Amino acid sequence: MKKRILACILALTMTASLLTGCGSDAGNADSSAKPEAAADTAQEPEEAEPVAEPEQEADSGNEDQADGEKFDKEVTLTFWSPTWHKDADEQVIADFAKLYPNIKIEATFYSTDDIKTNTKVAASSGTLPDMWYNWGGFNFANYYASADLCYDLTAYAQENGWEDKYLKSALDLCTLDGKVIALPQVYTGLVMWYRTDILEQYGLEVPKTFEELENICEVLKENGQASFSTGGWHIFRYLEALLEYYAGPEEHDALNTLEADWASSEAVAQAFAKLKEWGDKGYFIDGYVTEDANNAKMYVFGGTSAMVMDNSGMASDVVANGYDTSQYSFFAFPTGKDGNTGRISSYVKTTQFNKNLTDDQFEAAMIFWDYYYSEESLKSHPSIEQPTAIAGAELSEAMQLADGMLEMIDAAGSYTTTDQDVPNEIMDVVFATEEAVLLGTIEPSAAGAEIQKAIDAYKAASK
Amino acid sequence: MKEKLKAFSFLAPALLIYIIIIVFPGIYSVVLSFFEWNGVSEKRFVGLANYVKLFTNDVIFRIALKNNIIWIVLTVCITVVLALILALVLNEKFTGRIVYRSIFYFPYMLSWIVIGIIWKWMYNPNFGMINTFLGAVGLDSLKGSYLSNPKIALYCIFAAALWQGLGQPMLYFLAGLQTMSSDVLEAARIDGAGKINLFIRIIVPMLKETFVIVLATQIIASMKVYDIIYVMTDSGPANATQTLATYMYNQTFSYNNLGMGSTVATIMVIIMMFIIVPYVIFSTKED
C-alpha cells in the first residue's frame, strides 16, 4: 500500500511540474525568433549575456574628462537590449564610459523573443530595468505606458526640441495620448527589395502601378521564377499592402484601429481574394505557408525568388553576406491608385525608461542616448542599427543600399505596421485566417467575418 | 528518531528549493486561473469564467486539446512500442550492438530546437532532403510542402519527434531488460515457452515498473510538447499544429492573458492526473 501511495505521489509530482510552465524561467533562450511582430528582422536568438562593465581607460583626453566632469554624480543604469545590438551597444558603452566615468551602463542582451517576454515578466513582478529596448505600438511600448510603468518624456522632449531632432512620423509612433512614452531609435518601412539582375534578364522594369507589379509576376511565372519570397507570419506583409491598396488610407486606418467592420468590408474580401489568387498562381515560393519568416530573404539571395518585402535591414544583410550590391535595389509596393505610390507600412524601434528613475538617473540616461546618437558616435560606431530616427542622419556605408528609403516614405506617406498596433490575439487570428484562405479551407469572402469575430471577442473581453 | 531527523536534515534544503521553485509557482498558477490579469493591472477575480470560456467558446483551445490527445496516442502506440522493440533487439548479443545503441540514443541528446531545425530543413519543399530524395528516385508525385498541409503537418512533426524521442524509452527498457534474471527466462524456455509466450507472459510483466516510468514520462512529455512545434510550424498552418503548451505560451506572453494562460496550464495538469494516476494505481495494484 505504501508503495502505491509513493508511486502516486511521484506521478503527481511529475505532473505538477507542468504547472510551473507559466512561471518558469522566461529567459530560456531555446527558442527561435518568434513571429510575433512582422516589424522585426531576422536575428539569431542567443542566450542572455550579462556584460562585464566596460573598462575605463585612464588615457582619456582632457576634453573627455571635461565632459565627464559635467556629470559628477555616481549613477548606475541597468539596460536590456537585443542581441543584435550587442556589438554596437558594447562599443558605445565602452566609449561613453571614457567620457562619463561616473555613469555606469549595465547592459544585458536578450534574443528577440526573450526581451519581449522578460520585460513583461519583469513588469508584472516590479523588476523592470532602468531602460529597455522595445518596439512601438499597442503590443509593445504602449503596454508599459498604459500600465504607467514608463517615464513620461513629454516635458523633456519639449524642452529639448525632439520635434526637430527626430523624424515626425517616428516621434508620433512614440506618442500615446499626447505623451511621449519612448525615445525613438530606429525608423524604417517595408518596401519591395528586388534582384535587379532577374528583372533585367526578363526585360522588366520597376513597377509604378499595381497592374505593372502583377504583370511582372506573370512574366516571372511564365519563366518558372517565383516572384515573392515569404513565409509564415511574413505573408501578412503582402496582405497588409493589399489591404492598403484596396481599402485606401482612410478605410485601412479604420480597419487597423478596429473601428471599421472587417466582415462587411469589400476591400478586405478583395485583398484576401487577391492574396489567394497570387498563391494559386504560384507567385510565392513553394512551401511559403510554413516557411520560416526569417528565411524569406534567403530565397532572394539565392535567386529562387525575385522580390521580398522587407525593411532597411536588407541593405546591411546584402553587404554583410558579401552579395553583389549592384544586384539589389528596392521600390515601394504600389499601394496607391492613379499612378501614386501610396503609403508605406512603417514602424519604430525604441527605448523606454523606468518610471521610477531618479532625477540623476534620468539625466544620466539622456546624456547616454544623446551620445549614442551623436554624429561622432554614429560615425565611430557603424554597427549602430540604422536608419536611426534622427532627422537628417546619414546612413553608414553598409546601409547605402537603403539610401533614399526614408525620403521615399516621407514623400509617399506612411501608416503603422499593422501588427505593431493591433492586439496580438487579433493578429494571430489574422495570420491563421490568411493561412486558411491560402490553403483553401476558408473562402476569401468569409475571411473578414472570421477576423471581426475575434475583434468583437477582444472588445467584449476588454470591457 | 535521531535517524529520521538526520534524514530530514539532508532532505530539507532540496525540499525547500522544491517548494519555492515548483510548489509555490504551481499553486500560484492555479490561483491565477481564477483571475483576469494582464500582468501589470489589478487582478480581477472571475471564478471559473476562464474555464467556461475555454471549453465553450474557444475553437483554438479545442484544436490544441485534440492535437495533444493525438500526440499522446501516437506516443504510446508508436514511440513506446518502437522503443520496446528496439530495446529487445539491442538486448541480444551481436557484433556492433553498442554502436547501434549509441546511434539510436544519439538524437535524444539533441535539443528539440535542433531537431526542429534539422527536420524543418529536411521537409523544405525547395531545398529539403526529402523532396530531393523523392525526385531522385522518380517519386515526384509524392513531393510536396508537407508542413504547409494542415492535414498532415502534425504527423510530420511527430515523425521528427519520434526520431528524437526513441532514445530515452529505449534506454529505460534496455535497463529493465538487463536487470531481469536470466534464470527466470531460462526456466521459461526449458518449460517450453516460445518467443511470443516468453515476451507476453514473462518479459512484459517483469517490465511492469519500467512501463510505469516510460508511460508516465512519455505522456507528460506529450502533454508539454512545445519547442519542436514552435520551431517547425509555430502552431500553423492555420492553427493546425496548435497544442496546449503553445496556446498557453501565446495566452500568457503574447496576449498578456496571464489568467487564461494559467487556466490552460491547470487544465493540462488535470488531464495528466486523469491519465496517469489511475494508471499508476492500476499497475502497482498487485504490489
Image (cartoon, coloured by chain):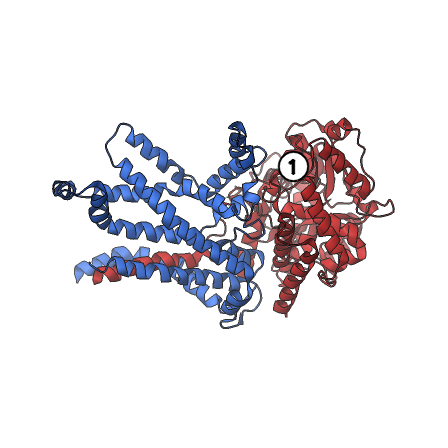
- Could you say which quadrant of the image residue A210 lies in? top right
Residue A245 image offset from top left, x and y in percent: 78, 50
- Could you say which quadrant of the image residue A195 lies in? top right
Q: Please identify the quadrant where the N terminus of chain A is shown.
A: bottom left
Question: Compared with residue B216, is residue A60 higher up or lower down, i.e. above or below?
Answer: above
Query: Is B7 positioned to the left or the right of B67 in the image?
Result: left
Q: Colour of chain A?
A: red
Instruction: Assess disc 1: are there few (<14), some (14-19) or many (≥20) residues with their C-alpha within 10 Å of its C-alpha.
Output: many
Q: Residue furthest right?
A: A338
Question: Compared with residue A189, is residue B94 higher up or lower down, i.e. above or below?
Answer: above
Chain given the colour blue: B
Q: Write the residue at 71% across / 51% down.
A: A272
**Residue behind mark 1:** A297
Residue A107 image offset from top left, x and y in percent: 56, 46
Query: Is A266 positioned to the left or the right of B233 in the image?
Result: right
The residue marked by circle 1 belongs to what chain? A
> Does residue A185 appear in the picture of this structure?
no
Q: Write the residue at 22% across / 59% down.
A: A3
Q: Secondary structure at mark 1?
A: helix
State the residue in front, B282 or A460.
Answer: B282
- Could you say which quadrant of the image residue A152 lies in? bottom right
**Numbered marks: total:** 1
Residue A359 image offset from top left, x and y in percent: 64, 57
